[in-house]
Image (cartoon, grey):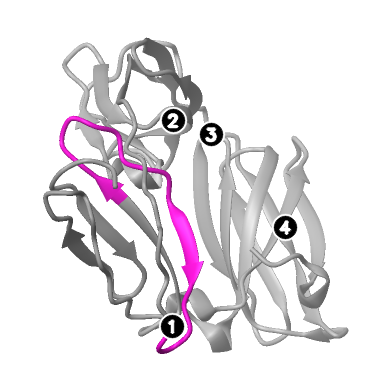
Amino acid sequence: WVGEEEDVAWIGYPASRFSTDAEGRFELQPTSTKARILASKRGFSPSDVQEYEVDPGETLEGIVLHLRETCRVEGRVLDEHGDPLPGVKVSSNAISSMGTSVDVNSLGVFELEGLPPGITLLFAYHPTRDGMASATVTLTPGQSASVDLRFERRDPVLVHGRVTRGGKPVECNFGLLGKGFATECASGPDGRFEVTLQRPGEWRGAVWLVSESFSLPDPTRIDVRRFSVSVPDAEQHAFELEFDGLPRL
């Protein structure tokens, strides 16, 4: 289908990996009814991820996975003052990049290769900091992109509020992601929560019931809801969430 001897991964739980034959053909036996697959091969960028639903006993034929040309990005990691920051690991969020990551050199410079074309989000982590530097870059095959990843300064804001479901308080877990920072918190039996966010600005969140905590064997079945909140530059901010009124993640 797409070359010789590439790996085809069925991304579900548990994840599985298969190899194609000399004609690029493959046959998979998925471990779940709903999963995703991609193909990878050294020297190429992995294929797009394709999603399928397969009923027990059903056979799907004619699936084609296209390998792509690789892309490259280079850049620097800077601290809050704009100075080069060594000792940092830079990673790509592209699921088809198979967890590509590199360490910066003593001047804070890095290079990432083998990335897929299109929009990619890059992250930089430092072991002594609770935040991260991030940037979005558009990658084109045959061209080298350049980007700076700069850590943000802390400007803490105390955020509190309440979560309800059908008007009644509910215990939930939260994950929150803002520019340069991420954090977690939980609401108690009274539905109330309190967390110190590292800085004001736009934050995206995911919330799920404590009774449905992520667990094996299939974490994809958890009912996760998403929300966003604009946190002002103030000492504290409050907001409330109605669980059933939030869109599913």
Residue 97 x/y as whole percent: 31, 40
> Label 1 to label 2, Cα distance in Å?
45 Å
Pointer 1 residue:
58
Is 25 part of what is drawn in magenta?
Answer: no
Pointer 3 residue:
154
Q: Relative to 225, is 214 above or below? A: below
Q: Which residues are magenta?
A: 39-57
Is 47 part of what is drawn in magenta?
Answer: yes
Q: Quadrant of residue 30?
A: bottom left
> Quick one: SS at disc 3?
loop
> Quick one: SS at disc 2?
strand
> Label 1 to label 4, Cα distance in Å?
37 Å
> Label 4 to label 2, Cα distance in Å?
22 Å
Q: Residue furthest right?
A: 167
Q: Nearer the viewer, mark 4 or mark 2?
A: 4
Pointer 4 residue:
227
Pointer 2 residue:
133
What amino acid type should be assigned to the residue bearing mark 4? Answer: Phe
Residue depicted at 25% across the width and 67% down the height: 27
